[in-house]
Image (tube, helix red, strand yellow):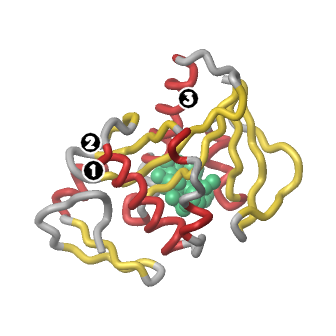
Amino acid sequence: MRAGSRISNIQLRYNHGGITYEVSPVQWNVIVNDFTCKLVASDTELQGAFEVRRLVFVQEQGVTEALEYDGLDDEALHVIARDEDIVVGTARVRFPTRNQAKIERMAVLEPFRRKGIASAILSFVKQELRNRGIEHAVLHAQTTVTGLYKLHGFQETGSPFREDGIEHIEMWMDL
Ligand SMILES: CC(C)(COP(=O)(O)OP(=O)(O)OC[C@H]1O[C@@H](n2cnc3c(N)ncnc32)[C@H](O)[C@@H]1OP(=O)(O)O)[C@@H](O)C(=O)NCCC(=O)NCCS
């Protein structure tokens, strides 16, 4: 199993929750210190984003592939965090109305968590949306990670609900 879209010189196996990640220690350090966030611009990058979502949502969290790949990816912007040749985090953005963005499918590979990668993706997404003149952003946060979004200015609204078998709550912010 591979941690991301492409990786060479794999040397280190990392097991979490029954999933084995294979990561070169050199890559690990480079990624954590030198990753960049960008819009997906090629099919290879999109496949890298899909692979992160498969590992995180399907394998780790038990979401079915049918729910994860819901047919809405073609209408979305996709953002990735990557170094030269490995995708470690992703999110997608859809536009339910002309003035509102919905951020979905935020995921970071487990070995790379708590190092600011999701936070960097969110900062990138917010700037991208501002550049496009979008004024409002919403998302359905897993209730265990609302702190991440609060750090970025999102506020909870309404009551928790279940989506794909996982407890969520809606959050929003004015950009
Ligand atoms: C949620 C997720 C995307 C966060 O990615 P990450 O790269 O680890 O997040 P960051 O390192 O940028 O976190 C920034 C801050 O957000 C908060 N945060 C992040 N993950 C958190 C968690 N699991 N629990 C509580 N707070 C969390 C912390 O305040 C963190 O700062 P700290 O590490 O200095 O305490 C990642 O854990 C993940 O992919 N989880 C599985 C899928 C998922 O739940 N996606 C979210 C769907 S709404």
Q: Is 17 located above or below residue 26 in the figure?
A: below
Quarter of the picture containing the N terminus is bottom left
Marks 3 and 1, the one that precedes in the sequence? 1
In the image, the residue with mark 3 has its CB under 8 Å from the nearest atom of ligand 1: no
Q: Is 172 located above or below residue 170 in the figure?
A: above
Quarter of the picture containing the C terminus is top right
Which SS class for mark 3? Answer: helix
In the rendered structure, which amino acid carries the disc numbered 2? Asp
Q: Which residue is mark 2?
A: 34
Looking at the rendered structure, which numbered label has been put on residue 126? 3
Rendering quarter of residue 139: top right
Looking at the rendered structure, which numbered label has been put on residue 131? none
Does the residue at mark 3 contact the one at mark 1 (Cβ under 8 Å)? no
Measured as percent of width and height from the top left, residue 124 is found at 47, 32
Judge from the rendering whether residue 70 lies leftward or rightward of residue 81; answer left or right.
right
Rendering quarter of residue 126: top right
Residue extending farthest bottom: 18
Residue found at x 37% / y 35%: 38
Q: Which residue is mark 1?
A: 31
In the rendered structure, which amino acid carries the disc numbered 1? Ile
For the residue pair 42 and 138, the one nearer the viewer reads as 42
- Badge 1 density bin: few <14, some 14–19, many ≥20, Cα 10 Å: many
C-alpha separation, residue under disc 2 versus residue under disc 3 = 20 Å
Residue found at x 84% / y 43%: 157
C-alpha separation, residue under disc 3 versus residue under disc 1 = 22 Å
Does the residue at mark 1 contact the one at mark 2 (Cβ under 8 Å)? yes
Residue found at x 83% / y 57%: 160
